[in-house]
Amino acid sequence: MSSTIEQNSPTTVMQERLDQFQARIDADEKIEPKDWMPEEYRKTVLRQMSQHAHSEVIGMQPEGNWILRAPCLRAKKILLAKIQDEGGHGLYLYSAAETLGTGREALIESLHNGKAKYSSIFNYPTLNWADIGAIGWLVDGAAIVNQVSLQRTSYGPYARAMVRICKEESFHQRQGYEIMTTMMRGNSAQKEMAQDAMNRWWWPALMMFGPHDKDSAHTQQSMQWRIKRESNDVLRQRFIDKTIDQAHLIGLTIPDEQLKYNEDTKHWDIGPINWDEFWQVVGGHGLCNEQRMKHHIRAHQDGQWVREAANAFAQKQISFN
Ligand code: BYC
């Protein structure tokens, strides 16, 4: 007689459910909010999506610093639009994360009490206008490489949010490259500023992809569940190969004495990444961690009356209907 889920012991039932879940993943089906999923899958997707949403919103701060000091009206308008896009990306991602059963207030509470992370990159300061170019080109450039891959992530709402986000991110990357190109066509002081920004942002941008695969706690399971479609090192290498050519094209030097093109692998080999610095920043001891969190908490508190008013209005609408 063929065994059915009902006839089996609880352990076997769970194993069958896990197998069926994995079979759906292997067949490249999307997992939707009301589908059964292992608790660990739910936790992992929620962790990654909320971290991603927080990164988009916290990432508005280093750029927002330059809205009032953009060098011309055109640059100011473009920067404003870009930062507004990042806020929008945060909103799509919080909405997608909420489909897993955790509300936005709880997600933000986890950010404020330090349980949830945001990308290490946003704990570095933006010292001059060239940094805005470097963020668009290198930071958004690294984010796109990751996010293009995430368009095929197994959790449906995350994948669909990514499709929309990627369309906007490619514009952001070009905005940054345009700033760097303009500065590299300028006078020697402007060229120096662009190179200085490159020197400061290159390594932190490589760290955005997370630890090497051998040291990455989540990669193996996340790839089995196709939450991540490619590993940290594969994505990092793709970014390196693509970006080095772009840097050379406009006359920028990569700040890495060990950088070498490998004829056998057809990839660029880089020197060692400073993982101590990465873990210091992730652990809350980067140059701007404290400032970023304080600002976010203050802005969230200042917005309390708006949330209360919006909720009161929504309640009124419900009672009228
Ligand atoms: N920063 O096992 P691993 C943007 C943590 S914003 C901080 O490899 P995983 C933009 C990791 O969380 C776009 N922490 O982890 C916005 C884990 O710790 P926990 C940002 C990091 O999750 C405004 C531990 O290290 N993009 O584009 O498998 C202006 C071990 O790592 C980082 C995303 O958020 C890091 N960089 O892989 C401009 C992409 N890296 O959680 C631009 C979505 C690792 O166990 N996220 N950690 O305590 C991902 O793709 C993955 O979460 C990661 C890490 C590749 C980042």
Image: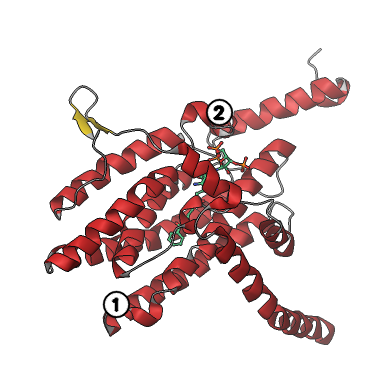
In the image, residue 181 lies at what x, y percent? Answer: 18, 63
In the image, residue 59 lies at what x, y percent? Answer: 49, 63
Residues tagged 1 and 2 counted as in contact (Cβ below 8 A) = no
Marks 1, 2: nearer the viewer? 1
| Mark earlier in primary sequence (1, 2) | 1
Secondary structure beneath label 1: helix
Residue pushed farthest top?
Answer: 1
| Residue at x 39%, y 82% (from the top left corner) | 68
Res. 123 visible in picture: yes
Task: Look at the picture and state if 142 lies above or below 84.
Answer: above
Q: Residue 37 vs residue 79: left or right?
A: right
In the image, residue 9 lies at what x, y percent? Answer: 87, 20
| Quarter of the rendering containing residue 74 | bottom left
Q: In the picture, which quadrant includes the C terminus? A: bottom right
The residue pinned by badge 1 equals 75
Compute the Cα span from label 1 to label 2.
Answer: 42 Å
Q: Nearer the viewer, residue 263 or 154?
A: 263
Q: Nearer the viewer, residue 245 or 23?
A: 245
Q: Nearer the viewer, residue 160 or 287?
A: 287
- Dot 1 beta carbon under 8 Å from ligand 1: no
Name which residue type carries label 2.
Gln
Task: Look at the picture and state if 176 lies above or below 77.
Answer: above
Res. 210 visible in picture: no
| Residue at x 65%, y 48% (from the top left corner) | 46
Q: Nearer the viewer, residue 148 or 111?
A: 111
Task: Specify the label residue 220 is tagged with.
Answer: 2
Name which residue type carries label 1.
Ala
| Residue at x 36%, y 45% (from the top left corner) | 203
In the image, residue 128 lies at what x, y percent? Answer: 33, 69
